[in-house]
Amino acid sequence: MKKFWQDFKAFAFKGNIIDLAVGVMIGGAFGKITTSFVNDIIMPVISLLIGGSDFTSKFIALDGNTYATLEAAQEAGAACITYGTFLQTVIDFLIIALFVFIMVRMIAKLHKKKEEAPAEPARLCPYCKQEVDKEATRCHHCTSEIGDAE
């Protein structure tokens, strides 16, 4: 049992796990911000464009009856397809996906710039043609003196 707790402690407090936990917390907060953005800014504009009604109240009652509101249909026990809420969730997802895509693209560009730095050509021993350190004065392959860097 003691070994189990030691292994768990080693696992739980590794840097990667802490980074993951921080990422999940930031992701949750970002999700709340995005949901608020969609609910409070995007959807009212869409509702205004389609006639001024609350978009989340759009539904189809599957029992064949007509109800004035979603709440009335739910009180009557009717199964409903709430396509307005679904569409709002899809828009929420698309905005999050767009921001994640932009972030990944920016990070990829940063990594690409680091990789594009030209590598210094390898220094070769003039006798055995093996690669040697740029500051070496003697080849570690053939032990020949190679002098200053060329």
Image: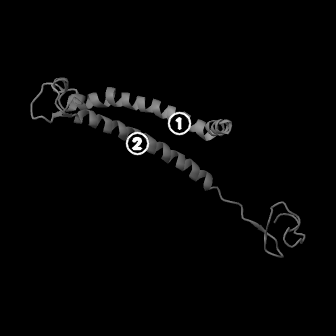
> How crowded is the residue under tag 1: few (<14 C-alpha within 10 Å), some, or many (20+)?
few
C-alpha gap between disc 2 and disc 1: 16 Å
**Furthest residue to the front?**
1
Where residue 81 sits, quadrant-wise, is top left
**Percent of width and height locating residue 147:** 89, 66
In the image, residue 123 sits, relative to residue 10, either above or below, namely below
Q: Quadrant of residue 122?
A: bottom right
Q: Residue at x 87, y 64 (%)?
A: 148
User: Where residue 18 sits in the image (x, y, percent)?
Assistant: 60, 36
Q: Nearer the viewer, mark 2 or mark 1?
A: 1
Which residue is depicted at the point 17% across and 27% down? 77
Q: For mark 1, what is the residue?
A: 23
Q: Residues within 10 Å of mark 2 (few under 14, many from 20)?
A: few
Quadrant hosting residue 117: bottom right
Q: Residue at x 12, y 34 (%)?
A: 63
Extreme residue in the bottom direction: 127
Name the amino acid type tagged 1: Gly
In depth, the one of 42 and 65 nearer the eye is 65
In screen coordinates, is 146 left or right of 82? right
- Looking at the picture, tell me which residue is in the foreground, 20 or 143: 20
Q: Of 18 and 98, which appears nearest the observer?
A: 18
- Please provide percent x and percent y for residue 90: 31, 39
Secondary structure type for disc 1 = helix
Looking at the figure, which quarter contains the C terminus?
Answer: bottom right
> Is residue 131 depicted above or below 22 in this figure?
below
Secondary element at tag 2: helix
Q: Is residue 104 left or right of residue 92?
A: right
Question: In the image, which disc is placed on residue 45?
Answer: none
The residue type indicated by label 2 comes to Ala
Q: What number is the disc on residue 97?
A: 2
Provide residue 60's location: percent of width, then percent of height: 16, 35
